[in-house]
Image (tube, rainbow, N blue to C red):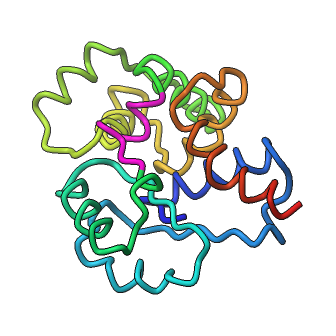
Amino acid sequence: MVVEGPTEVRLIRRLAEELHGAWEGSGLAITDLEGDKLEGSRPMLEGFANADVVALLLDNRNDVARVSARLTEAGVLAEPHVQLWERSLEEDNFTLDELLAMIAELGRRAGATLVLDEEAVLVARETTKAKGLASVLQRLARQPGHGAVVFNKPDLADPMAELILRDARRPIVAWVLAYPVAAMRAEA
């Protein structure tokens, strides 16, 4: 599996383990692409030619759809194994209210109180050049006027997993069941 970043790595591993069992010894590998720039990744993806399945999970930014289509046409990727989020992992699987609640909980655990509402986030999103909602939330939450809640985006992976495990009607669940969990079951 090739995913966009460390948040996806933590989330996918946690969900696969919760839905099936231990990741270690499963024969699965997950690679963090360290961003959504797929253009220069062809040599790495071609290096997975011996893998049974290569599943790609990225946000649909920076020409990812065009590049993944080109890689599919070239036979580097099998088309059914490409999942591109319309907006982002966070936005396509969680509401803004749910994301704010996760960040508030991270703040509480660190002794900070988040003072941020949906309206402030939406206004900031319209006036900032940040790529994704998670980046906007991270920048806003750190501001003293919003509670000085400092977190890294991968810190959201565990609260995301907990919410998904309580309410599995989210798009990411289908991908996790189709790739890591299906492969883990095949190995068992």
Q: Which residue is drawn at 31% across and 41% down?
A: 139
- From the viewer's perspective, is 131 left or right of 170? left
Q: Give the range drawn in magenta.
A: 83-93
Q: Which residue lies furthest to the right in this view?
A: 188
**Which of 48 and 57 lies nearest the eye of the viewer?**
48
Q: Residue at x 52, y 52 (%)?
A: 7
Quadrant of the image occupied by residue 121: top left
Give the quarter of the figure containing the C terminus: bottom right
**Which of 154 and 149 lies nearest the eye of the viewer?**
154
State whether residue 148 is above or below residue 60: above
Quadrant of the image occupied by residue 140: top left
Percent x, y of residue 148: 42, 36
Q: Which residue is drawn at 45% across and 52% down?
A: 80
**Which of 138 and 93 lies nearest the eye of the viewer?**
93
Percent x, y of residue 112: 54, 31
Q: Residue furthest left?
A: 127
Give the quarter of the figure containing the N terminus: bottom right
- From the viewer's perspective, is 34 left or right of 151? left
Q: Residue at x 49, y 45 (%)?
A: 151
Quadrant of the image occupied by residue 24: bottom right
> Is 61 one of the magenta-colored residues?
no
State whether residue 171 is above or below residue 51: above
State whether residue 107 is above or below residue 2: above
